Image (cartoon, helix red, strand yellow):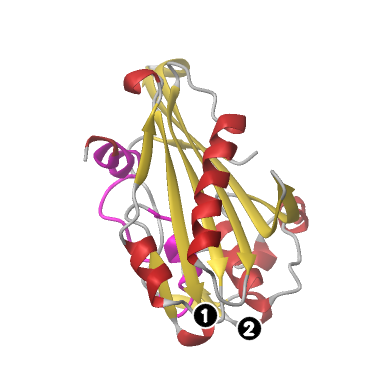
Amino acid sequence: MSERVDDGTDSGGRDAESVGRNGESRDADRPEPESLPAEIRESVPDYDDEYLDRVSDRLMYSYDLEADVVERGERFDLYAKMRLRNQKQFLHPALSYADHDVMEHVFARRVTAPTDEEIERLVEFAHGVADDRVEGDEQHYGTDITVVLVADQIPETVADFVEGFRDRTLLKLGYYGHYEVNLVVVAPDQKRLVASEVADVAGAFRLWEPVEEPEEGFFSRFAKRFWR
């Protein structure tokens, strides 16, 4: 499992690009995939899909990646999992306190044209994933479950639904954190993407634009989302 420790700052994405896998553009100040240790490169699947390969180049630094997964009866071409732990330390890393975990599960697949019914079914799917995977306790801060559809085109009814979507569930009135369901629909050939309000991972799928530099740390952004 990929695990990051965040002290409130986040290097995030960049505003310049260079060449990545298969010669496509990628973020300039991240290391070339070929320069990473062999065990990391070998853990990144080959998706046999140029677009998803390029997305994985953006995700591989923070996420564990899998290909061709089946979850609760739904098949996905790409699955990504990230765990971020925020720690406060007293003098030494061994003396940590107030640990909080943030998780994200990203499920992405190809479709021709998503329908309203499919989107609604996948929202229920995401809640089912939360039932299976979210372990609410005092250390759990939040979990994002994001479903991404890579489409040939985006119907306007789907775009309207996704852009107006927000679904957050508090666990034990918030004492055990919360989980958030996010939606992203992208039509790469049309260079069009729609996303729900707090789908932060959407930038990784907007390949025609550089990843934006965040103005604050990941946990700060996550905390603001909780109180909105």
Q: Quadrant of the N terminus?
A: top right
Q: Quadrant of residue 175?
A: top left
Pointer 2 residue: 23
The residue at 48%/64% (across/down) is 116
Q: What's the residue type where badge 1 is placed?
A: Pro
Tell me: 141 left or right of 22: left
Tell me: 175 left or right of 85: left
Q: Nearer the viewer, residue 161 or 106?
A: 161
Give the mark nearest the N terminus, 1 or 2.
2
Q: What's the residue type where badge 2 is placed?
A: Gly
Label 1 residue SS:
helix
Q: Nearer the viewer, mark 1 or mark 2?
A: 1
Q: CA distance from mark 1 to mark 2?
A: 17 Å
- On the image, the x and y values in percent for residue 43 come to 75, 53
Tell me: 1 left or right of 220: right
Image: magenta residue range: 199-225
Pointer 1 residue: 188
